[in-house]
Image: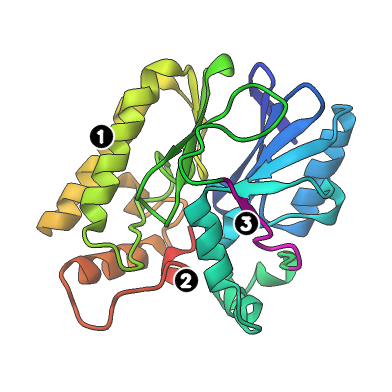
Amino acid sequence: MLRQVAEGVLVHQSEFMQSNAVVVQGGAGVLLIDAGVTGDEMDCLANDIRELGQPVVAGFSTHPHWDHLLWHANLGAAPRYGTARCAATVRDRLSDPGAKARVATMIPPDLVEQVPLDLLGLITGVPADTARIPWDGPDVRIIEHQAHAPGHAALVIAERRVLVAGDLLSDVLIPFLDLSGTADPIDDYLAALQLIEGVASDVDVFIPGHGSVGAAEQIPARIAQDRAYLRALRDADVLSDPRLGPSAHGKDWLPGVHERQLQCVAGAPGTRKDGLKPSTLG
Ligand SMILES: [Zn+2]
C-alpha cells in the first residue's frame, strides 16, 4: 500500500526490515527510489503506481547493497541511476558469473525464493559530482558521502521538503559501517551525519531506508542515537541502544552485526568484511 508522506511523495514499506520504497511524482511520471525487496511487493507497488495514472520514468538506488538494487519487470524499463561510485561498485561486484548466486547467500533463507534477482543492479552511474537526479520532476538533490556503503547517497527534494536518507537515520538498524576497505569508517559515518544535520532545516519529513518515516523534529534525536552508537563502538564503551534490545525489530541478528563491527574496529585479523556479505545486508 502506498502512503503519502508529503505532497507528491509516497512510501511503500516492505515487511523485510521495514524497507521503504519512495515514489516521487513528476510531470510525466514518477521517480522510484529503492524499489523494494520481494517480487510480490514490487508487483503490488507497480499496480499502485499504475493507479496513480503515471508510469515510472526513472529509478534510483541509494547505495550498492542488494536490498536497494532490486527491480521488477512490471515497473517498466525506465533508466535506473545511482552515484558514479555506487554504479562502479555494483559493476565490480556483479561482474563475474557467480555473482548472483553469491548475492543469494546474503539473503535470509526464508526470503530468498521471493526475491527476484534477474534485474538486480542494472543501474547507470550519474557523472561524479552530479548535483541532481536527471529526470522530469521536482529537483532531487544528491548528497553523496562515505558511510554505510561506497557511493551512498541521501536525497533532498527541496520543493516537497523531504529528505530520503538511504540507510542513515534508521530507528530499526544500528549504523552499519562501510568495512570494504575505508581508512576510518567511524569517522566517515560521523562526517555523513554532520552533512545530514546541515540539510535538516530544508525538510519537514525524512524517510530512512529502513524503519519509520519521521518529522524533521525527530532528526536530531536519530542523529544523536547514531552518534552515541558510533562513539561507543569506537571507544568500546558500554552501549544501551534500543535497536539492539530484546524486543527490537532485528533482535535475532543485529547483535551479531554489532559484535562483528566491534571486532573489526578493534582490528581483529580476518574480520574485514566485504560490503555485500551478510554482515552488511542493510
Ligand atoms: Zn538497506
Which quadrant of the view contains residue 103? bottom right
Element under disc 3: loop
Dot 1 surroundings within 10 Å: few (below 14), some, or many (20 or more)? Answer: few
Q: Position of residue 94 (x, y in %)?
A: 60, 72
Q: Nearer the viewer, mark 3 or mark 1?
A: 3
- The Cα–Cα distance between marks 2 and 1, rounded to whole angstroms, is 27 Å
Which of 122/147 is in front?
A: 122
Q: Which residue is mark 3?
A: 69
Residue at image location 32% in from the left, 25% down from the top: 198
Relative to 222, is 115 above or below?
below
Residue 86 seen in the current view: yes
Q: Position of residue 264 (x, y in %)?
A: 24, 70
Q: Quadrant of the N terminus?
A: top right
Relative to 51, is 273 above or below?
below
Residues rendered magenta in the picture? 118-126
SS majority, magenta: loop
Element under disc 2: helix
Q: Earlier in the sequence, mark 2 or mark 3?
A: 3
Residue at image location 75% in from the left, 65% down from the top: 116
Q: Which residue is mark 1?
A: 224
Q: Is residue 125 magenta?
A: yes
Element under disc 1: helix
Residue at image location 33% in from the left, 57% down from the top: 177
Q: Which residue is mark 2?
A: 278
